[in-house]
Image (cartoon, coloured by chain):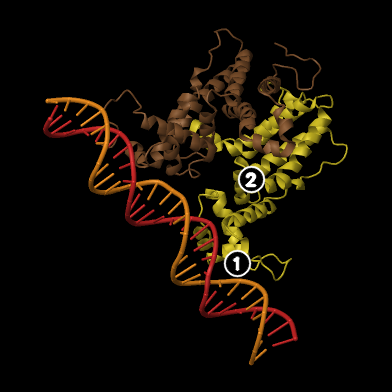
Chain colours: A brown, B yellow, C red, D orange
Amino acid sequence: MSRRAAVPDLDAPDARKRLIEAAQAAFAERGFDGVSVRDITADAGVNIAAVNYYFGGKEGLYIEAVKHAHDCAGRMDGFPKPPPGTPPAEKLRGFIREMVHRMHAPASPTSMKLMMREMADPGKASHVVVTEFIQPVAFMLREILREMLPKLDESRLLATGFSVIGQILFYRQNRPVSELIFGKKVVDALDVELVTEHITRFTLAALGHAEPIGSQKERFKQ
Amino acid sequence: MSRRAAVPDLDAPDARKRLIEAAQAAFAERGFDGVSVRDITADAGVNIAAVNYYFGGKEGLYIEAVKHAHDCAGRMDGFPKPPPGTPPAEKLRGFIREMVHRMHAPASPTSMKLMMREMADPGKASHVVVTEFIQPVAFMLREILREMLPKLDESRLLATGFSVIGQILFYRQNRPVSELIFGKKVVDALDVELVTEHITRFTLAALGHAEPIGSQKERFKQ
DNA sequence: CTATATTTCAAACAATTGATTGACATCTGA
DNA sequence: TCAGATGTCAATCAATTGTTTGAAATATAG
């Protein structure tokens, strides 16, 4: 009815595209309630009515912006597959490295910010983010951990996964607060490489595949 | 000028108190922008003008609500002090237990929710929450870890603290998403005790004070 | 070209927002 | 009792919100 009609596959009569991109930036920065459709349309150089014309309303635009975001952010299922025969500990190391990198240096920071916002309090578009973005990664991690801990019961395996993800997410979700506590300079000293190495070491040590933190031997067993 | 004038120490002419409590609940549930002063005053059974009269505006009420929150939530510096001579690993265990409990079964869930919201994106009252609520805990953890890892450089020590806090915070900040992924039942199986025990074990193992996760020996070395 | 569909636009709409006003009530202390 | 301070109230303000309108412009197809 009100949807774009002409070409079903070519997905951007320009106004629509600019609208989505402006919306993505605005929503990422200030959240759904913090942004007015007037702001967005002004940024996009488009008339206000276009929002209802193309998306049926503010909420429709928001959802579309989130959907567009996880395209830009690099699909999570695009994780580099370790060659078969790779020891599970090595898979885990690769997983953590990839994950930390995507969190801290995403292809599209704006898109990542928007998705994180939607995760922080799941709302209108949480289903999109979760099923297409988070779910595949979660199951990938679970498989790796299951391989490393074949005898662990489901609950503890889940908790172990949460321990890994929790460490990784912390730096994204709580950086502002951390900076308030310890100072920006100190926190900034934790660059991507250091964080990656630390989380990997911490996790592998917890799983018995590396020397404990603080141990003299600088590298891991296997 | 417009502030309450009469009794500077007795802090609640009833209307003021009810306003703060209603505000706390509303802000915790729906956030600053999600709540109108009309909602709050209606809940509190107070006239709208009272907000400006007592707090100078919506923002003033919000800040006061947050301040009130960290009183209710149990001050974080009220951690049970371990007796002197307690081995540092035992201190860490106590810290984690206390922290997890406060996160999952806080004295005032509403207050905790409000503070978490303010932490999630630091705004008008972040300074209050951080300095009076978070900061003391952060330094307490750092002392414990420093005792356990006397030779570790500052950056890595900080990262280790983040690994602990990250694990603990995950269950609070990301429970909704986790439930979307794995299902509510599965996640609910991770009750406070199991989470406490897991994070403690995981962390102590990473620090070399317990057997690794998945190891047969069910308890820790020292 | 003509007719039909699609897109854009300025203007206005109804609803909600936070804030303010000024009259009225209540309390306090002499 | 009186006067001033303190608290409460309904009514209203100005601004902003998302949404809608109906006409004008533009593109598309016969």
**Left or right of B17 on screen, residue B90:** right
| Residue A213 vertical position relative to residue A115 in the rendered view, above or below | above
| Residue visible at 76% across and 46% down in the picture | B77
Numbered tag placed on residue B105 in the rendering? 2
| Residue visible at 59% across and 24% down in the picture | A105
Graded by Cα atoms within 10 Å as few (under 14), some (14 to 19) or many (20 or more), the crowding at tag 2 reads few
The image quarter containing residue B13 is: bottom right
Q: Secondary structure at mark 1?
A: helix
**Left or right of B6 on screen, residue C16:** left
The image quarter containing residue A177 is: top right
Q: Mark 2 or 1, which is nearer the eye?
A: 1
| Residue visible at 60% across and 14% down in the picture | A91
Percent x, y of residue A111 = 50, 29
Graded by Cα atoms within 10 Å as few (under 14), some (14 to 19) or many (20 or more), the crowding at tag 1 reads some
Residue nearer the viewer, A194 or B199: A194
Percent x, y of residue B107 = 66, 50
Percent x, y of residue C8 = 33, 37
Residue nearer the viewer, B26 or B34: B34
Q: Which residue is mark 1?
A: B15
| Residue B203 vertical position relative to residue B14 in the rendered view, above or below | above
